[in-house]
């Protein structure tokens, strides 16, 4: 079996192998029913670890391309998913198209793992009980209040909202934000702020300002898949640093920055995604100091600051940024609703000035209608009211999830106790694989986000993220019982 | 005077020269009051054409950095604009920042001309009578109707609008668009469509899918500055082809494609920006055929299709795309209001599939609240009603502008008679410079968009774009008289 493995490529080997085999299946070179080599044979012939082959086969199985039978090995599925068949018989223009694609695209987007979409796909199933989403509970959305604010903004700002505008953002919202950010302990002027379509756009733009292909970004491993994707799409190298209950391991950061130059350090110091860790105060000081010494720019993602479930908000790194050389982002998408697509970047004015043309040539400016409505929502005190209600609901759900896990999870399973945010993290014991567990849980109608989604390099910390924010207490208890059963079954089977 | 001129750099020489001198002024090496060399001296010492030096000095004068006095030459202004001074005294972290910027950014965004912002800046002056904007008239916005649709969509789709979603777009809008596009003569399925934040985002994404640094895009010269910027930001080479009253010169396209490989051809075949030309039927056939033969992908920007002021809509190129290998974009931002930031890309499904991860890592997805409201607006027939009203108003304004020009412009000035869209184009005779004219007009409270804004290479066609859509008849007549006076004054002065 001819599969290209490129060890200089930052894409994990198991993903390269998976993509290679999927290509053979889609291209018809491995037809339905064909037997794949055993994991042992293939690992020897390719000179890779057998676990790499096992991981690739598992992923192919999750995608419905291959099937494993105990004692009979792995073979290509008799009935391939429609998407795989369609890809296997490209229409004529597709062949022509291939020749036009940029190398930049091939070397970046094409290699970004597709697991995210798989889990999101599962999440779209209205019948599934989903702990996968990090989206807030839609039933808590302030639909009526936001509707009033839309109307009120239309009356107040009139045609200004429908007109074009500056790439920086809607002026009245920019005027308001410094006082809003002051409550987070961030001192800034209007010149140090811009509005973007979500933190994702902010990360993509900051990446374009600083990163050339091959440049290094240090980040937590595990981390937010959208950040990994945004930086990898620019062909940057993402270096992962482990996370424990006190957040990013700053000693490892020091080691990495001592060995190689990194332009950016991307971090979620508060309610880290996916581990829910909060960076300790001692580490915060040391991280800022280390990055300052090494000339590495900190990009802080403070995406869910206000959701302090135990009532004590944690000051962002930016609040300690005396030297004024740090980028911090925050989002109304997370604390209000994802559909609003409104976030901010706060950074030294020279950085904002250089981000403006990137925004301009990306999409000119963010729509102003929602910026106007959001400003109304904030100024009328509705955001605070909404947050109070939401925090109370999420606290109950977190507590229900913790209690249910305590009551039913196997003893060797560990989990975080989040002080805030939307999810918690479960560490699986050795021999219990998150993807295998997902397969079993999905068959019983429960889905979650497995470790691989968040892996910067090979995942070193097996586990899963369980979102509690979007599920009510009754379903949380039911779902956790299902997971507990699936875990017990996995444990009794051991590793494959 | 030490100024770097790099002839291998695609940036026009006069812009390089301008940027170099501006840097010396901002850096304090040329202090306020300092005399610049005469245009003759500098052209000799740098070995460039004297017109290049004249153009650079003119631009610096427009920016308020230098001032020319007849007989006394050119010197640095005594009072520099605040922006120039601020840039001249960078705070400490800026110096540090410079070392972090990506080469990609330096080689792209940093070199994109800033004239656009200058004119936009002028456009922000509420007292100026502006023909510069291509924005529709805000007073024609259907504020109340759109407000109802927002409310109605909130009731109808509820929390779906506030939740997250697919990078492809809001499903009900995607389901609706094929019937909407069928009215433009475009046959497509839902799989061939995606929603983006304006055509600008579409261009930026298509560029990233196809263009590596150094790749070629053929386009009209003159063209939409946002397209030039989006492609240049990817370090692509933009090759301009001239435009006459029948649109893009297809013979020139054939010559260019015969000499070099171009991945993309970007065109606005209908009401071209800025010339308002409509590509003739014969040229349409020939353009499609040529690009098909050469393997160049057509990217059609049909941004203002519905605004057929003489009642006959022009079929887009995509409607003749039997082979299914063409990208077409259209926008609700132009036909409804710019603030809505909603456009679509229609393209073969394999292209859309590859654009989806780019959208995902750019900003996840476009906000759904406005997509829901827009769908209501369309389905209730309000878009058609709005377009009727708008087209009638624009027709009156176009006719008023044409009549006013006929009555007052000097004989040697020529202009287009647009069949649709938002503006017309004025060709200036040799010896009358658009930027000089802008200076004179601005002093009298009238602004417009000069040729250089739209220049792909050195501008070969001196003139200006006059937007009629956003100005009422009375102000149009007044503004045209001001321009006519400024032209007569320029003509009597001759070239500098």
Image: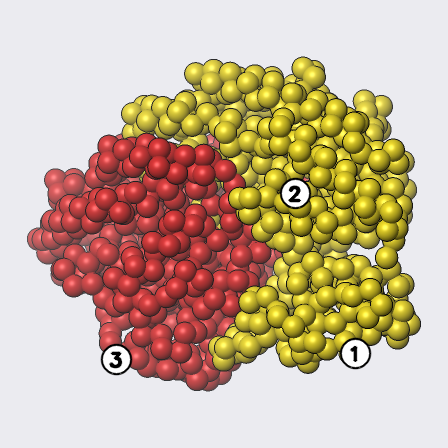
Chain colours: A yellow, B red
Disc 1 crowd rating (10 Å Cα; few below 14, some 14-19, many 20+) is few
Mark nearer the viewer, 1 or 3 = 1
- Please tell me whether residue A30 is drawn above or below residue B227 in the rendered image: below
Mark nearer the viewer, 1 or 2 = 2
Rendered-image quadrant of the N terminus of chain A: bottom right
Q: Which mark is residue A353?
A: none
User: Between marks 1 and 2, how big is the CA–CA gap?
Assistant: 36 Å
Q: Quadrant of residue A44?
A: bottom right
Q: Nearer the viewer, residue A365 or A35?
A: A35
Tell whether B482 sits left or right of A225.
Answer: left
Q: Which mark is residue A1?
A: 1
Residue B476's spot in the image, x, y percent? 16, 44
Disc 3 element: helix
Q: Residue at x 43, y 31 (%)?
A: A371
Residue A127's spot in the image, x, y percent? 55, 44
Q: Nearer the viewer, residue A171 or A161?
A: A161
Q: Is residue A91 visible?
A: yes
Which residue is label 3 attached to? Answer: B282
Q: Which mark is residue A446?
A: 2
Q: Residue at x 35, y 33 (%)?
A: B155
Disc 2 crowd rating (10 Å Cα; few below 14, some 14-19, many 20+) is many
Disc 2 element: strand
Q: Nearer the viewer, residue B130 or A445?
A: A445
Q: Quadrant of residue A48?
A: bottom right
Residue B289's spot in the image, x, y percent? 37, 82
Residue A411's spot in the image, x, y percent? 87, 33
Q: Residue at x 51, y 32 (%)?
A: A138
Between discs 1 and 2, the one toward the N terminus: 1
Chain hosting mark 1: A
Q: Is residue B60 visible?
A: no
- Please tell me whether residue A248 is drawn above or below residue B2 in the rendered image: above
């Amino acid at each position: 079996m001819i599969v290209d493995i490129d060890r200089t490529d930052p894409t994990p080997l198991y993903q390269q192998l998976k993509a290679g085999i999927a290509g053979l299946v889609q291209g018809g070179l491995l037809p339905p029913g064909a037997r794949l080599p055993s994991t042992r044979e293939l690992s020897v012939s390719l000179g890779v670890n057998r676990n790499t082959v096992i991981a690739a086969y598992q992923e192919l199985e999750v995608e419905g391309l291959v099937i494993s039978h105990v004692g009979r090995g792995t073979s290509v599925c008799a009935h391939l998913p429609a998407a795989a068949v369609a890809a296997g018989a490209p229409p004529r223009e597709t062949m022509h198209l291939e020749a036009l694609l940029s190398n930049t695209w091939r070397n970046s987007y094409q290699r970004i793992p597709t697991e995210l979409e798989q889990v999101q796909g599962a999440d779209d199933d209205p019948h599934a009980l989903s702990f996968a989403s990090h989206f807030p509970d839609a039933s808590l959305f302030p639909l009526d209040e936001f509707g009033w604010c839309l109307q009120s903004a239309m009356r107040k700002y009139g045609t200004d909202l429908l007109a074009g505008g500056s790439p920086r953002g809607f002026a009245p919202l920019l005027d308001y934000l410094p006082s809003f950010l002051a409550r987070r302990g961030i001192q800034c002027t209007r010149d140090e702020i811009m509005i973007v379509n979500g933190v994702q756009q902010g990360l993509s733009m900051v990446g374009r300002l600083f990163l050339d292909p091959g440049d290094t970004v240090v980040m937590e491993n595990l981390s937010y898949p959208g950040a990994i994707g945004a930086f990898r799409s620019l062909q940057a190298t993402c270096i992962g640093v482990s996370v424990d209950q006190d957040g990013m391991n700053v000693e490892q950061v020091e080691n990495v920055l001592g060995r190689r130059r990194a332009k950016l350090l991307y971090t979620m110091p508060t309610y880290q995604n996916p581990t829910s860790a909060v960076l300790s105060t001692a580490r915060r000081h040391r991280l800022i100091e280390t990055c300052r010494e090494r000339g590495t720019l900190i990009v802080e993602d403070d995406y869910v600051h206000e959701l302090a479930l135990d009532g004590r908000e944690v000051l962002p790194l930016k609040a300690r940024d005396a030297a004024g050389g740090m980028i911090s982002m925050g989002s109304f998408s997370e604390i209000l609703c994802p559909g609003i697509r409104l976030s901010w970047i706060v950074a030294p004015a020279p950085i904002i000035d250089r981000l403006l043309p990137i925004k301009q040539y990306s999409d000119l400016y963010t729509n102003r209608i929602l910026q106007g409505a959001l400003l109304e929502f904030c100024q009328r005190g509705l955001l605070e009211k909404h947050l109070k209600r939401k925090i109370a609901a999420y606290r109950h759900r977190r507590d229900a999830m913790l209690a249910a896990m305590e009551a039913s999870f196997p003893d060797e399973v560990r989990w975080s106790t989040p002080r805030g945010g939307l999810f918690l993290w479960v560490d699986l014991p050795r021999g219990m694989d998150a993807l295998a567990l997902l397969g079993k849980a999905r068959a019983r109608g429960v889905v979650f986000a497995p470790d691989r989604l968040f892996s910067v390099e090979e995942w070193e910390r097996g586990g899963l993220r369980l979102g509690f924010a979007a599920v009510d207490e009754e379903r949380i208890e039911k779902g956790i019982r299902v997971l507990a059963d699936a875990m017990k079954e996995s444990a009794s089977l051991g590793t494959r």
